[in-house]
Image: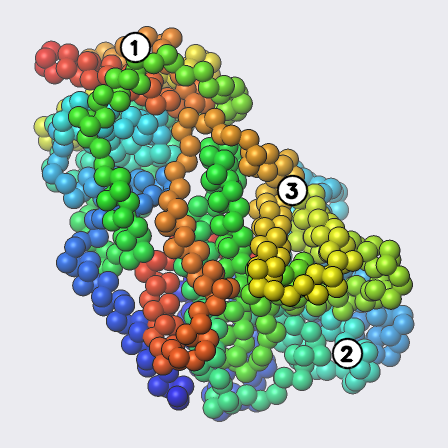
Amino acid sequence: MSAVRWLIKCSAGAAILLIACGFATARFGSGLQMPATTTRDGTLITLSRYLREPVPDVVLVGSSLTFRLKEEYFATPSLRNLALAGGSPVTGLKIVANRPQLPGLILVEMNVLSRSVDAPLVERYSRDIEPLFFRPVRAAVAAYEQRRHAPLTHEQVAPELRRLVGRPPSDFDNRVYADRALQQFNAEDPTDEARINTKRIEELIRMVEQRGARVLLIELPYSEAIESSRSAAITRKIAHAAFPDSKRWLPVEVNRSELRWTDGVHLDERSAVIVTQAMERALASARMAK
Amino acid sequence: MTFTSWQFGAFVAIVFAAYYLPALRAFQVQLLVFASLFFYGYGQPELLALLAVAVFGTYLFLVLALRSRRLWLPAGIAFNLALLAFFKYKLLFIDPASPSLVDFAPLDFLLKLPLPIGISFFVFHNISLLVDLTRQKAAPPSLVDVFLYIIFFPQLVSGPITRAEMFMPQIKPKYLADIPLVDAAKWTLTGFFFKLYVANNLNEMTSYMSFPLYETLQTQDRWLLVFLYSYQIYADFFGYSAIAIGLGLLFGYRLPINFDLPYIATSFSEFWTRWHISLSNWLRTYLYIPLGGNRHGVWRTYLNLMIVMGLGGLWHGAGLGYLMWGLLHGLLLVLERPLLARLAAVDFAAFRVARMTVVFFCVTMLWIFFKLPNFDHAVGYLAGMFTPSTNPNPTKLFYSLALLYSLPVMIQHLGFRPLSEGRLRWAEPYLYGSMAALMYLEAGPDTSFIYFQF
């Protein structure tokens, strides 16, 4: 076979596969939830779904702390958690604010204000651009995984959540991780970034509230040691100075002795459920008060 | 400029087009040298001066050694090893973050320079040049030929380490009609496919092997990731070498094959004839044999093996982990050596498979020291492989995805009989075309080649 014929056949092989994927993308869309191998993947899945599905009533934006509050833990229907593990609450809030339709209520986590906005992510999810091709291997695995492990609804997990909360708190020894986190929290000075991000949040709140949405701020509980760390104290001070009105804050009232953290920062599963339930109680009161 | 960037694609296309212009045929070598300098200096122009010092210095020592080998050959080798040692191991003694390291400004500048990419490879080229050409007692080659041998861009950053006696005779005018286009396309496509589809996707998962992320893993996932890293490092380095060979062919140069299905080796000594072959050959030719090889009795042979493998480990980096990796490989070579003849006498399929499994398992376990050069981190990872995980929120890995991204390495090693026997020869171009499409559609997040750091 001559080299030219070989190269033509090779190019044809590539073209056939690309065209097939192009047709499949046009027919089925690229929205199939890809399996997430990294937290970044998980973020993309969550945001893609937000763009594809009808606008929910309630949206949560935040960092990895809020990321742990899984949507199925909430009894509130039509709620989406857009928290980005490793990300800033401003990124999520900006994406929501840039969409043509807004949810009725936006909850903004104010624990982590030291991270800058993920501009490429905001840009990508502020426009309705579908990629030309999906990833065939990932799409196949996603279809397989979804078939085996379809996303759960609150009704499906409610009995298990009740059982989980009924159990005693975990006795997992998190000392190694908690010490490391505390060291980090004491070494970090988030003043500059926190001021900038608070300012951005103020502007975004003004913007979305002018368009009819309501915004409430939340602070998720840390372990006692982390609560009194340098970074947490500075962030809290800046956030409350910028938003002194207590009505702006959703109170998360829980029995702290019931809570456990994997590393002093992130809630374990049982504690995340307890905090979720406290948030739902506070949400109900806030809505009634309104 | 990395091989996987669009800038590199444009660069190769321009150089290729100019290279075969009849008007420029007389300047092909100069053109490749200029292109290689551009490639190396792109993004790091300050390192060009160092490259020039290495090449000019080596050339000077070569000319002198051709007059008096005894005196100038060791001096030339020492010059190159000093360069390597200075840049590679200076961080053992200094803290680059400190504002001023020494009072002498030029030395301070040198101490603060980053590790020059590819230094481990071009220093080995230089030594090969000095040894091979002075052994042949030939007339000194032209400076531009020496430049091309040392800095030819496909092999400059991570090899294959080409011996001077193999490369220098290939320097002559090249014609477009002589290019083995299909071979070049196959090597290049295979290389990119292994890098983009296999290595970059597996890297997403094996990034969890880093400290402290590995503490979030379940015990069985620690085991899985070690094997995935074994596939990843192969796909990454084989991919780089295959691209280099393909590009070499495009410009009329045959570079040595660097990998020959290493994970089907049935002994550790065979593994080293299949893995990073050009480094193994270099170490054997320029270190093991000059040390005496196996010519001075059993114990001296064992010592030589340990020295060569220990230095081979340290060549990768100045860390206890790399040294351990090399020494443990040396130990495995020493342990198997008395048994090799007896093992070879037992020749049936199941036994060969068992031997392959043992070699693959040991080689894979030792990659932990490569992935985690910090010795404490490596030991921490290893310890966690034998203790149950208690983390209540372990990282979730998709086994089906891991399998699909590892599959090309497995198929390549286990062989695909209809293709190798020729029954599916007609489908070969379509298969390569599909690989091209798949590496575009399914490319994992861009990461640099693992061997760039060496």
**Quarter of the rendering occupied by the C terminus of chain A:** top left
Q: Can residue A233 be seen in this view?
A: no
Q: Which mark is residue B96?
A: 3
In front of the other: A150 or B285: A150
User: Type of residue at label 2?
Assistant: Leu
Q: How crowded is mark 3: few (under 14 residues within 10 Å), some or many (20 or more)?
A: some
Q: Residues within 10 Å of mark 1 (few under 14, many from 20)?
A: some
Letter of the chain that mark 2 sits on in the rendering: B
User: Type of residue at label 1?
Assistant: Val
In front of the other: B410 or A61: B410
Letter of the chain that mark 3 sits on in the rendering: B
Pinpoint residue B299: horizontal percent, then vertical percent.
86, 55
**Quarter of the rendering occupied by the N terminus of chain A:** bottom left
Asked if both marks, 1 and 2, belong to the same chain, the answer given is no
Residue A155 position by quadrant: top left
Q: Which residue is rendered at x = 62% and y = 70% of the image?
A: B151
CA gap, disc 3 and disc 2: 38 Å
Q: Which residue is rendered at x = 40% and y = 29% of the image?
A: B393
Q: Which of marks 1 and 2 is in front?
A: 1
Pinpoint residue B25: horizontal percent, then vertical percent.
53, 89
Letter of the chain that mark 1 sits on in the rendering: A
Q: Which residue is rendered at x = 45% and y = 78% of the image?
A: B421
Pinpoint residue B172: horizontal percent, then vertical percent.
61, 87
Q: Which residue is rendered at x = 26% and y = 21% of the image?
A: A161
Total number of numbered discs in the rendering: 3
Q: Residue A254 carries which label?
A: 1
Q: Is residue B52 left or right of residue B238?
A: right
In front of the other: B201 or B333: B333
Asked if both marks, 3 and 1, belong to the same chain, the answer given is no
What residue did someone put label 2 on? B133
Q: In this view, does B246 lie to the left or right of A44?
A: right
